Image: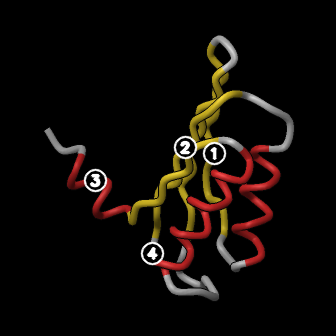
Amino acid sequence: MKAIVTVLGKDKVGIIAKVCVYLAERNVNVLEISQTILEGYFNMIMIIDITRTTCPLTELADGLEKLGEQIGVVIKFQREEIFESMHRI
């Protein structure tokens, strides 16, 4: 099962590292990462494999949101099927 994680905020050192450590501690595998910095704003989208996660998905999503607050960015989590259905034309 896959999910999408998006991160947006002012660029600073350690954003990718902190998000990846959080996910790794919950046995989530990062499949793909795309990140850009535009005029000082950090934007990242990750495709993750949540098949073997060690916590409930609501806890994972809430934890990512709290992590974002701690490091000064906005982090959103969506299961892949929800993300795809929201972005169909």
Q: How is the image coloured?
A: secondary structure
Q: CA distance from mark 1 to mark 4?
A: 17 Å
Q: CA distance from mark 3 to mark 4?
A: 13 Å
Tell me which label, 1 or 2, sits earlier in the chain: 1
SS label for mark 2? strand
Whether residue 75 is situated above or below residue 60 in the rendered picture: above
Check disc 3 and give the amino acid type. Glu
SS label for mark 1? strand
Check disc 2 and give the amino acid type. Ile
Q: CA distance from mark 1 to mark 2?
A: 6 Å
Q: Kindly check if marks 1 and 2 are in contact, taking CB atoms under 8 A apart as contact.
A: yes
Whether residue 27 is situated above or below residue 74 in the rendered picture: below
Tell me which label, 1 or 4, sits earlier in the chain: 4
Q: Residues within 10 Å of mark 1 (few under 14, many from 20)?
A: few
Q: Which mark is residue 45?
A: 2
Where residue 39 sits in the image (x, y, percent)? Answer: 65, 11
Q: Which mark is residue 84?
A: 3
Quadrant (top left/top right/bottom left/bottom right) for the N terminus: bottom left
Q: CA distance from mark 2 to mark 4?
A: 17 Å
Residue at label 4? 1
Q: Residue at x 64, y 51 (%)?
A: 69
Q: Residues within 10 Å of mark 3 (few under 14, many from 20)?
A: few
SS label for mark 4? loop
Check disc 1 and give the amino acid type. Ile
Q: CA distance from mark 3 to mark 1?
A: 17 Å
Q: Residues within 10 Å of mark 4 (few under 14, many from 20)?
A: few
Tell me which label, 2 or 4, sits earlier in the chain: 4
SS label for mark 3? helix
Q: Which mark is residue 33?
A: 1
